Amino acid sequence: MDKKELRRYIAQQKRNYSVAQKTEWSSSLFQKLEGHPLFLQAHTLLLYHSLTDEVQTHEFIKRWHPYKRIVLPLVKGDELEFRYYEGEDSLQAGAFGIEEPTGSLVENLHEIELSIIPGVAFDRSGNRLGRGKGYYDRALTKLQSYRIGVCFQLQLLPHIPVEATDLPMDEVWTEQGCVFSGTQYSQ
């Protein structure tokens, strides 16, 4: 299958599960990820404010905001801009119906130690299939942080076609835990 067909296939698979099921899986994934050595050490995390069909991050962000600096992306033209999450009141509706941060701009992207990245699908080699606009692929070239892709087990594919601009994840996690690790930090 090509990337468009894979996106359609995954969208159809996600429709087979309730919001409650996806919320339960998300909770399980993040409970496991909270024990990761790099998560425990990180002071500044890049997360994302999830859409309803993605691994749900809202509760995770609220829980960890008092203890870690949370950075969220927002769409600016063809690029992602990164801003600090400063509480629920600092979110506003942005591009594609995503709640986006209005907090201060992250001036030094090198302070982001760990990036938790969504995807339409991942494979067991760390390859990521995005939504097709290339926002994360362009943004990840500017970040030096460790990259953990998160998805539901149903989004894990045997193989994702990759292009030169596609950057792999350092690890991939589902509700079952770490399913790919290219490093010593696997669980």
Image (spheres, rainbow, N blue to C red):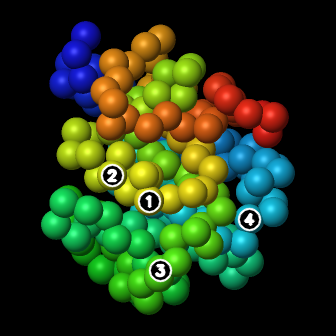
Residue bearing the label numbered 1:
142
Q: What residue type is labelled 4?
A: Ala
Pick whichever, 16 or 153, lies toward us.
153
Disc 1/disc 3 C-alpha distance (Å): 12 Å
Residue 149 percent location from the top left of the image: 54, 41
SS of the residue at dot 1? loop
Between residue 180 and residue 111, name the one nearer to us.
Answer: 111
Spatial distance from mark 3 to mark 2, Cα to Cα? Answer: 16 Å
From the viewer's perspective, is residue 122 above or below residue 81? above
CA distance for labels 3 and 4: 16 Å
The image shows residue 160 at horizontal and vertical percentages of 38, 19
Residue located at (51% from left, 71% from top):
109
What residue is pinned by disc 3? 106
Residue drawn at (60%, 56%), measured in percent from left and top?
145
The local secondary structure at tag 4 comes to loop
Q: Residues within 10 Å of mark 1 (few under 14, many from 20)?
A: few
The tag on residue 42 is: 4
Quarter residue 185 falls in: top right
Earlier-in-chain disc, 1 versus 3: 3
Distance Cα–Cα, label 2 vs label 4: 23 Å
> Picture coordinates of residue 187 (x, y %)?
81, 34
Which residue bears the numbered disc 2? 138
Residue type, label 2: Arg
Mark before the other along the chain sequence, 4 or 1: 4
What's the residue at 42%, 32% (across, down)?
Answer: 128
Question: Does residue 150 sit above or below 143 in this rendering?
Answer: above
Instruction: Tell me, yes or no, whether the two marked residues, 4 and 1, touch with CB atoms within 8 Å.
Output: no
Mark 3: secondary structure:
loop
Type of the residue with mark 3: Val
Find out whether the residues at labels 2 and 1 contact each other: C-beta distance under 8 Å.
yes
Tag of residue 2: none
